[in-house]
Image (cartoon, rainbow, N blue to C red):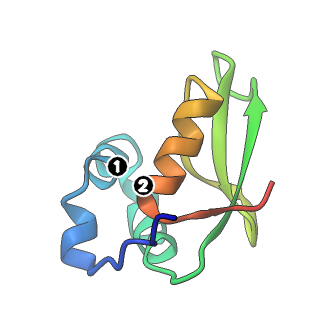
């Protein structure tokens, strides 16, 4: 069984996920960091075509309009969620 990483803000901001998020969505970056630092962040992974291409989106359970990330495959979404310590609930 893997354990959830305990992130400090400084360590979290050095992850590839945070660096890419900051580059792609700087306006939402502070919110994403706040969510990612939550001890028990719960996320939903779902397939969407809301943008130009079909993709798998990682949404915050308590704020489903907020995307933590969007990746091309479900496996990539699950892997990222596990690496970041986000609990997949759906």
- Rendered image: mark on residue 81: none
Q: Which residue does the numbered mark 2 point to in the structure image?
A: 83
As drawn, is 15 to the left or to the right of 25? left
Q: What kind of element bears circle 2? A: helix
Front position among marks 1 and 2: 2
45 over 51 or under it: above or below = below
Q: Residue at x 37, y 72 (%)?
A: 5
Q: Residue furthest right?
A: 90
Instruction: Estimate how packed mark 2 is, as few (under 14), some (14 to 19) or many (20 or more) residues with alpha carbons within 10 Å.
Output: some
| Residue 19 x %, y % | 25, 50
19 over 38 or under it: above or below = above
- The residue nearer to you, when weighing 33 against 15, is 15
35 over 26 or under it: above or below = below
- The residue nearer to you, when weighing 10 against 79, is 79
8 over 24 or under it: above or below = below
Q: Which residue does the numbered mark 1 point to in the structure image?
A: 17
As drawn, is 64 to the left or to the right of 36? right
Q: Residue at x 37, y 48 (%)?
A: 21
As drawn, is 33 to the left or to the right of 60? left
Chain-order first, disc 1 or disc 2: 1
Q: Are marks 1 and 2 in contact (CB under 8 Å)?
A: yes
As drawn, is 22 to the left or to the right of 46? left
| Residue 14 x %, y % | 18, 60
Q: What kind of element bears circle 1? A: helix
């Amino acid at each position: 069984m893997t354990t959830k990483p305990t992130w400090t803000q400084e360590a979290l901001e050095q992850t590839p996920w945070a660096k890419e998020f900051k580059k792609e969505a700087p306006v939402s970056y502070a919110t994403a960091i706040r969510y990612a630092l939550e001890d028990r962040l719960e996320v939903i992974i779902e397939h969407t075509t809301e943008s130009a291409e079909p993709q798998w989106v990682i949404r915050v359970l308590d704020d489903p309009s907020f995307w933590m990330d969007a990746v091309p495959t479900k496996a990539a979404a699950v892997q990222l969620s596990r690496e970041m310590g986000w609990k997949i609930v759906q």
